[in-house]
Image (cartoon, rainbow, N blue to C red):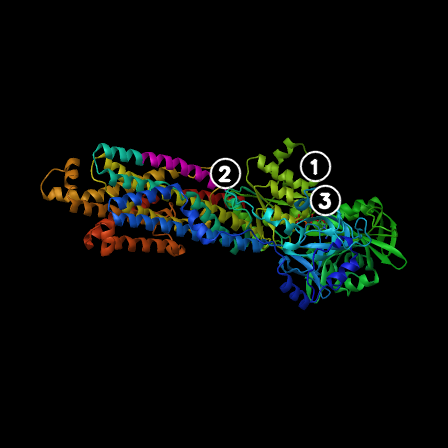
Amino acid sequence: MWIRRGNIMFENKTVRETCEELQTDSEYGLSYTEAAQRLQDNGANELKSAKKKTKVESFFEQLNDPLIYVLLAAAAVSILLQEVSDAIIIIVVVLMNAFVGIIQEGKAQKALDSLKKLTSPRAVVIREGKEQEVQASSLVPGDIVCLDAGCQIPADLRLVKANNLKVEESALTGESLPIEKNVDFIAGKGMGRGYKASSVPLGDRKNMAYMSTIVTNGRGLGIVTATGMNTEIGKIAALINDSQEEITPLQKRLGELGKMLSILSLGLCAALFFIAVLQHRNMAEMLITAISLAVAAVPEGLPAVVTICLALSVTRMVKVHTIVRRLPSVETLGAVSVVCSDKTGTLTQNRMTVEGCYIDEKIVDSSELKLREHSELLQGMTLCNDAVQKDGSSIGDPTELALLNLAGQYGIRRETLEREMPRKKELPFDSERKMMSTMHKNGSTNITYTKGAPDVVLKRCSRILIRGKVTAMTDTHRRQIQEAIEKMSSQALRTLAVAMRTGGNAPVERELTFVGMVGMRDPARPEAKGAVARFRQAGVTTVMITGDHVDTAFAIARQLGIVERQEQCMTGEEIQSLPDEKFLRKLDDVRVFARVSPEHKVRIVKGFKTKGNIVAMTGDGVNDAPSLKSADVGIAMGMTGTDVARQASDIILTDDNFATIEKAIEEGRGVYENIRKTVIFLLSSNLGEIMTMFLAVLCDIASPLKSSHILWINLITDSLPALALGVDENDGDSLMEEPPRKPKESLFARGGLACTCFYGLLIAGISLTAFFTVPYELIMSKGASFSISNIALALQNSDILMRAQTYAFTVLGMSQLFHAVGMRDIHKSVFRMNHFENKWMIAAFVLGFVLQISVTEVPVLIKAFGTVHLEFHEWLRLTILAAFPILAHEFMVFLQKPEKDVCNQVKMESIRIDR
Ligand code: ATP
């Protein structure tokens, strides 16, 4: 059993000493049982998060709000006036608000925690001699970890192997230039093989790699020396733990809108109070009413609604294989107008099989190779390969696995071959060079195999191997190879050339001997074609960006419906040669960018952005971080992506699938629509409440609602339907029929303002109608004339006033429930909506109705709210009146219908023409 003892300076130890100290073996690693034991003893390899708030702290935080102070003051005034029931209602409202707030906060925290788990890095570790991928949190001291370009270092490591290994340590040292690492032992200053404290600064410990830093180049192997809070980054973890939560642009805009509306409604309520004073009403009562109205009307919850909608959508997105790293990107997704996607693995399946080979001046089927005649090609593709196939499991790049599979069909295994011809040195693959080389011991000499993009490899070849003989490469050979590349590529095959060079002590990538070429099939994802078509319908342009050959890219892009003509393709070379102005003009038509390097991607993204688009961009490689960052929404690949790409991204696709982007955009649009619906609903309902009160006071009649009624409506009938709208299931088809919204579009655009005012006034109108019905009937029964002064007079009778207020209260509460149902889709009749899609709305509606009935039917509540019992026929009349928002909704849907149908027809026609 190994237990950590004090601070050991592993940089001052040799690899052997490190292994002895940590009781491990740099090739075999730890056994599973030992690793499990050490995990138990040392704890998980995680940075502890900052101290969490207690429930009591959260509770008091919720109460720390000016509006709550005002409400508490109103409660105090009520007690002074001996209106105990009002005071109780106010206090219940305050407490419920605080509890709802705590629950919401807890939910948001949970969502964030599970997000953290989902995005936590993984690591490739050697245990019992086998390479395997594990959660980085399960690493223990003594584990042997494999490092690759693009990976985030999962723990502190003493390096055992370093091939061109460069690590960017800015997270730790602030130094942004990558540091070249090696495995050499560093002597402690003034000591022999120092066991005492190292005086070597962190940045100079070249034989160590530290947690959270990033491999930018090369490959390596290291022994875990420290995990979790014992790592160097762990020691400063408290500093980096507290990352501030970001506020989304919409939240910000709503916050500002909320402030503006607050000032407006506070002004209105103050005006209401002063008018009431001038009218010599009961001042204390009017003060509480005005305060309650102000509390109800101030849309303080707007930013919270957005947070809830966004947070819930983040949870929903996980189900459709999308992890959202930054909340604001959900919002931006809804406005995306260009999606730039990688080809391999995103638009295609990344399941490669070699179909054909170009060897000895001709293209043959992959099954027609001859083991002895074509041994150099088979050996080259096997040795110059980093994929691992062991015990039925495969780890590595699908391109390389396809090569191992082909070699396997001829009985060649990498493990066996490497024992005969061990790898001595290597130049790892990078998407800039588009090739890789490995040097192997071959008897008394060395042999280097290079494999990579044929056009790149060909440029470095001066000889060619034909039927076992090496000859000088002529122009005819080059032309033949070029023709073979074009032929294979036009059949959508991904091509890869193999070359070799004998002798030398280091791999050199020039003066090579061309050995042969393979063509691999990577089938398009079946669902991608549909997604491209739906994107087009939704006004979103799909652009393919790939490192692959232009003909391969064109063939696949045409299959998927991204392009029709070859002229719509552009290569990295062309991008390089075009001046900005011409390049921007080309962007109108070009839909495929091939043989691009990562820096071109940034230019493409910026180009589309300059043209006013909101751009989503996928990426997986080490060098994709700049383009992911410059896109409006950076999308990293969860399966094949590097840690670097994941960290630079806004969202991660856990299935690397293009069609998932469509679902994410649909979700983004849906969330925006839900927020818009909720905001319009809340504001129109608030407007209804204010106008009801304001108009009555202006007419110098008794107030139609008591303060407790207003607070009740605000808490129960308003908030539940608003939340139900926030989580509404939108009709995906109709969401993806519209072009993307403009990024700066106001929530009140496209008729939103008119809708808010209309429903606000309608709700006020029907509530006042209900209020007037009681005095009206009295006036009529007495044969008096119907006038405002007679109504005012009739309302002086407290029984009449109580009944009239009960009517207004009931209609106002219920009309908002009906209004919420209509707001689910302002273009669709309620009879055509699928109400079971939104169970929350059904619950909010039923609960709202039951609660509204209980305030007039349950004796305790009748007493508390000062209402009266209503007869069945009264309920019937009031329900019909309250349903007016639905009638208005149906009428407007009826008016819109012909136009919408025509629009759809025109749209469908144009899609048919496009296809
Ligand atoms: P995409 O950018 O769509 O994911 P890609 O995988 O083709 O496409 P890169 O990874 O940059 O993009 O590869 C560019 C080219 O490099 C490929 O077309 C292929 O010819 C070559 N290549 C890819 N993987 C390897 C590899 N493991 N070894 C050698 N060459 C490779």
Q: Is residue 256 magenta?
A: yes
Q: Which mark is residue 576?
A: 1
Q: Is residue 735 magenta?
A: no
Q: Badge 2 local density, few (<14 within 10 Å), some, or many (20+)?
A: some
Magenta stretch? 248-268
The image quadrant of residue 700 is top left
Which of the two residues, 324 or 719, is positioned nearer the viewer here?
719
Amino acid at pointer 3: Pro
| Residue bearing mark 3 | 178
In the picture, measured across the screen, residue 751 lies left or right of residue 134, that is left
Upstream in sequence: badge 2 or badge 3: 3
Which of the two residues, 485 or 766, is positioned nearer the viewer here?
766
User: Mark 1 and mark 3: span between their CA atoms?
Assistant: 26 Å
Upstream in sequence: badge 2 or badge 1: 1
- Front tag of 1 and 3: 3
Q: Secondary structure at mark 1?
A: helix
In the picture, measured across the screen, residue 592 lies left or right of residue 736, that is right
Amino acid at pointer 2: Pro
- In the image, residue 276 sits, relative to residue 151, either above or below, namely above
- In the image, residue 680 sits, relative to residue 394, either above or below, namely above
Which of the two residues, 853 or 609, is positioned nearer the viewer here?
853
Q: Would the CB of label 2 be found within 8 Å of ligand 1?
A: no
Q: Secondary structure at mark 2?
A: loop
**Percent x, y of residue 437:** 79, 51
Amino acid at pointer 1: Gln
The image quadrant of residue 353 is bottom right
Secondary structure that dominates the magenta span = helix
User: Mark 2 and mark 3: span between their CA atoms?
Assistant: 37 Å
| Residue bearing mark 2 | 743
Is residue 139 visible in the rendered structure shown here?
A: yes
